[in-house]
Image (spheres, rainbow, N blue to C red):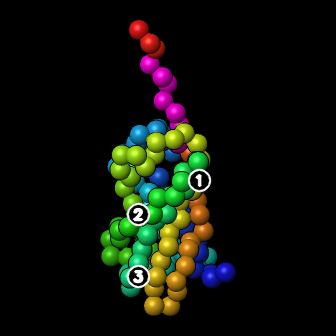
Amino acid sequence: MSPYTYILPQINADKDHIQIGAVDFLIELEIKNGHKILDISAATTKNIILEKPDDTIITAPGLFTTDGKDGLLYYSTVAGDLDQAGIYNAQAYLVLPWFTGYSTPVSFEVYANIPLPNN
């Protein structure tokens, strides 16, 4: 296992409370080696992989929050990404000149909405 596999999720929902159907939910990963932030600006591939509660996989292109020198990579969800209640896993896949591989996955929970009464 490479030492370049540490990530810290930066969740932008109110107290990490994410509802089904959330769009533009920011998943930001900070790539680190231990406590040292890694410069990922040379990445030729930078994907964020989401695993839904039913094990469906979404692979989306990650974007640098700034220029990649700060180790930050993000993805903003679109309609259909967060369509199930339960635990989601997020993971980066990077291709760099000195490393190719996956980060450590992180988890977050998506909550169901209260159904409207049938009138």
Residue type pointed to by label 1: Asp
The disc label shown at residue 60, or none: 2
The disc label shown at residue 109, or none: none
Q: Residue at x 35, y 50 (%)?
A: 78
Depicted 86 relative to depicted 63: above or below: above
Q: Residues within 10 Å of mark 2 (few under 14, many from 20)?
A: some
Label 1's element? Answer: loop
Q: Is residue 39 visible?
A: no
Separation of residues labelled 3 and 1 (CA atoms)? 27 Å
**Of the two numbered discs 1 and 2 in the rendering, the one whose residue sits closer to the viewer:** 1
**Of the two numbered discs 3 and 1 in the rendering, the one whose residue sits closer to the viewer:** 1
**Residue 9 in picture, x, y percent from top left:** 51, 59
Q: Residue at x 41, y 63 (%)?
A: 60
Separation of residues labelled 2 and 3 (CA atoms)? 15 Å
Q: Residue beneath label 3, please?
A: 43
Tell me which segment is drawn in magenta: 110-116
Residue type pointed to by label 3: Ala
Q: Residue lying farthest bottom?
A: 98
Upstream in sequence: badge 3 or badge 1: 3
